[in-house]
Image (cartoon, helix red, strand yellow):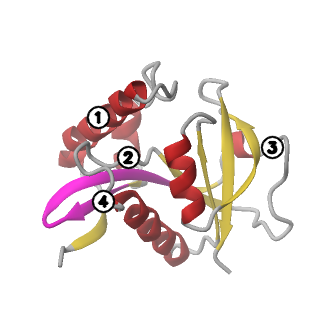
Amino acid sequence: MSNIYLRQAKADDLEKVVKIINGEKNALLVRGVNQWQRGYPDEEILKRDIEEGINYVLILDGSIVGTAALQQGYDKSYQDISGGSWSSESDVTYAIIHRIPVEPGHQGEKLTTALIQQLLTMSYYLGYYDVRIDTHPDNRVMQHVITENGFVERGIITLDTDQDIRKAYQILLK
């Protein structure tokens, strides 16, 4: 059986985190998904995630194989939603999962599911019972992973960073 766990990223993990993100950028390009193709997320954003303590890495048998940011509190991009609405039981503050790839070569091993489940546990531990995530409308693979993990599609948001639209999802851990 494999040893798998989540930990907060450290400064010396940055190179590996960037490598995983860049691998996912390439995988998205190959699949014809126009997500992360204009520079975002760049090394500066990933470095800031680590410095702010919101970047987590998934460890499989001693090696980093996945990464994600777990933002806590509030995100301006998630305030205006069209084509739906957040749950009537939504909290004022919430956790948001951002930038969640696994290392190329590990796709198909359900590691994104493991990473999401670990992040849900961390969200609950931190006191956030409303968890949100988004993805590009063409990223069908991620949409499947998100809904398979219990998230409900809530509508469309527009990202503050680049004005791109994203399908938005929510899960309540209450």
Mark 4 residue type: Glu
Q: Residue at x 68, y 48 (%)?
A: 168
The mark nearer the N terminus, 2 or 4, is 2
Residue 96 visible, this orientation:
no
Q: Residue at x 43, y 30 (%)?
A: 31
The mark nearer the N terminus, 1 or 3, is 1
Give the crowd class for mark 4: few <14, some 14-19, many >=20 residues within 10 Å: few
Quickly name the residue at label 4.
109
Quickly name the residue at label 2.
101
Dot 1 and dot 3 residues touching (CB under 8 Å)? no
* Numbered tag placed on residue 23 in the rendering: 1
Up/down of 1 relative to 74, above or below:
below
User: Quarter holding the C terminus?
Assistant: bottom right
The Cα atoms of the two marked residues, 1 and 4, are separated by: 16 Å
Q: Mainly helix, strand or loop, the magenta region?
A: strand
User: Quarter holding the N terminus?
Assistant: bottom left
Residue span colored magenta: 56-71
Mark 1 residue type: Gly
